[in-house]
Amino acid sequence: MVSESGESTFTVVLAGSMNLAIAVMKFVAGVITGSAAMLAEAVHSVADTLTEVLLLTALKVSGKPADRRHPFGYGKARYFWSLLAAVSIFVSGAVFALYEGFSTIFGEPEEQTRPVVAYVVLAVAFALESVSWVQAVRQVRREAAEQGRTFGTHLRRSDDPTSKTVLYEDSAALLGLILAFAGVGLHHLTGSSVWDGVASVAIGVLLAFVAFLLGRTNAGLLIGRQADPELVYAIHATITAAPEVEAVVDLQTMLIGTDRVLLCARVDFDDALSAGELERVCVRLAGELRITHSDVAEVFIEPVPRTDQQLREAVLARYGKSDLLR
């Protein structure tokens, strides 16, 4: 059975290989036909290929073990490189497509030559891109099933930007191919290159939208997003189930990488516990949390009194009247 990291690498390598082959075909077709939409799609595929290189870098760097300079590991490197991938989609793909499209719309009319070449290349590209898209969908569905989520919910909550990035860019690629086909076809039927330019602009807008979605996701993960709410409540239940615990006063989590959560818990323990007993309880709880919840990588437990009004106000300011404060 392929590991999750291995499947992610396979998904990225497959997508990159397909995109590189498709980019070459589109460039050749774009030069032969003089189609702005085809050239925009060629640059789109180049941007996607660069994206896969960045994602492979993300997978490699984020897997490095913790060291003195990075005691919590390199997990967030995956978010950084994935953010750069989103930027590359916008800069390399969207900007060029928009420029090429507006130049065609407002420039001198261009004659279309050998549109059949464009049709053949677009059809082959669609078939190849579909292979990568199916693999990305398969991986996201498997991840969603493992988490007990629907497909859409998993895309919103996932802390792994790799498969999500490949799925989004492949989906955009398929839509871009349809837009390019429409542009070439309308240019062929009407003799007006404006349709070619409109298709190129539409491809640019599509890429900008995808880049925005991916950029927003990775920016949130880099800043420090809370763990999945279901996991937070499960952690809360595990701690409160301990007989020595009176109440969970505060519970803070942060994603420090894919499937890696940093947990800080402020807990009101039974006042009858001695200092030694309290230490042993904290160690035991930390071990139980790591075993019960595999995503929990680092645990910090701080004994505090729940009557501390200043702390309670700070928690209320952060979460509002949460169930965690009952």
Image (tube, grey):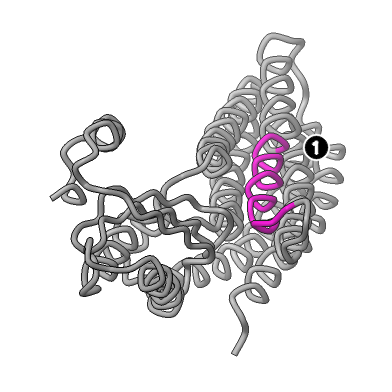
Residue at image point 45% right, 76% down: 287
Q: Is residue 148 left or right of residue 27?
A: left
Residue 284 % position (x, y): 41, 77
Q: Quadrant of residue 243?
A: bottom left
9 magenta-colored: no
- The magenta segment is 70-88
Task: Please tell me whether residue 190 is drawn above or below residue 69 in the rendered image.
Answer: above
Q: Quadrant of residue 30?
A: top right
Residue at image point 54% right, 33% down: 212
Residue 207 % position (x, y): 60, 35
Please indicate, yes or no, whether residue 182 appears anywhere in the rendered image. Answer: no
SS category of the residue bearing label 1: helix
Residue 128 % position (x, y): 68, 64
Task: Please tell me whether residue 117 is drawn above or below residue 43 in the rendered image.
Answer: below
Q: Is residue 154 left or right of residue 314?
A: right
Please indicate, yes or no, whether residue 43 appears anywhere in the rendered image. Answer: yes
Our reading of the magenta stretch's main secondary structure is helix
Residue at image point 67% right, 16% down: 102
